[in-house]
Structure formats: C-alpha cells, structure tokens
Amino acid sequence: VVAKGGNLVLGVGPSPEGLIQPEAVSRLQVIGKWLRSYGKAIYGTTITRHYHEGDLWFTASKDGRQLYAIYALKDGETLPKTLSWTVNIPKSVRMLGTGKTLRMKRHNGTVTVTLPDGMRNEPFALQLNM
C-alpha cells in the first residue's frame, strides 16, 4: 500500500468487557516486530517512479536519496534463493534489520541479489544504495 502512496489503517477495538482480544494482540505483536526490523522502508517514505515489479514493491525516502525494496511473500510460498528486477538498479544492497550487505550481480539491465541462508519465511525489506 505504501509503495503506491497509501497508508495502512489498523483498527483494533476492545471487547464489551474492555479487553483486546488475544488474536488481535498477537497480530499487533507480529506487525510491530516486523516494523522494528523493516520499518525504514515504510515510515517517512513516498512513491517511486517505478514502484512495483513482480513480488517487489519499491519506496523512497522523502528526499529521494534512499530507495527500498519490500518483498511481498505470498501465503504458502517459500522464499527464493535470489531476487531479480530491472528497475531501480542499485550500486549495492543491504538487508534492512541486519545491515548485512548482500551479494549482487548486474547483467544486461537486470540486478540479481542472493538472499542469505537461514532467513525466516516472511516478507522483508532491502535498502537499495543508489
């Protein structure tokens, strides 16, 4: 949603007893944990000229100096070993949350990034250094 210039509105209301349901608490904790690692690609960002390719969604810092790629893992899928795209080609790529620089190859207008072993099977975000 943020890659297209939108916002996520997350509403959680209490039960008649004034309590938040355990399922809602659990979901909010998962979202909070993800945002602690990858929130830089969400907070204070804006749309980019090329905001989507395949399962990647791109955002930019407000000043446009920093780009991010958010990988949207579909339900039931497993993370691939590599990601490739043809827009927003960076000089280098880092994993948000760990800061680890990832192995990257550029060839004929396509960049291919090798993901680290042992990653959790969940959506994640990359920092693209332009």
Image (cartoon, grey):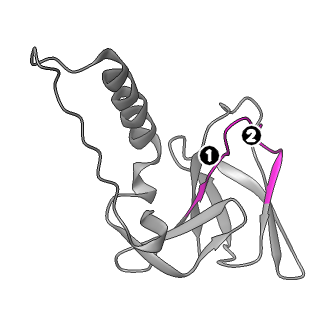
Q: Which residues are magenta?
A: 69-83
Q: Which residue is mark 1?
A: 100
Q: Nearer the viewer, residue 43 or 15?
A: 15
Q: How many marks?
A: 2
Q: Is residue 42 above or below residue 108?
A: above
**Rendering coords of residue 112 (x, y %):** 82, 63
Eyeballing the image, is 114 above or below 22? Answer: below
**Quick one: which residue is furthest to the right in this view?**
108
Q: Are marks 2 and 1 in contact (CB under 8 Å)?
A: yes
The residue type indicated by label 1 comes to: Lys
Please tell me in which quadrant of the rendered image residue 19 appears.
Answer: top left
Pointer 2 local density, CA inside 10 Å: few below 14, some 14–19, many at least 20: few
Q: Which tag is nearer the camera, tag 2 or tag 1? A: 2
> Which numbered disc flags the more N-terminal residue, 2 or 1?
1
Residue lying at 53% horizontally and 49% vertically, measured from the top left: 96
Residue highlighted by disc 2: 116
**Magenta region includes residue 21:** no
Q: Is residue 36 above or below residue 105?
A: above
Q: Is residue 67 visible?
A: no
At 67% from the left edge and 65% from the top edge, which residue is drawn?
92
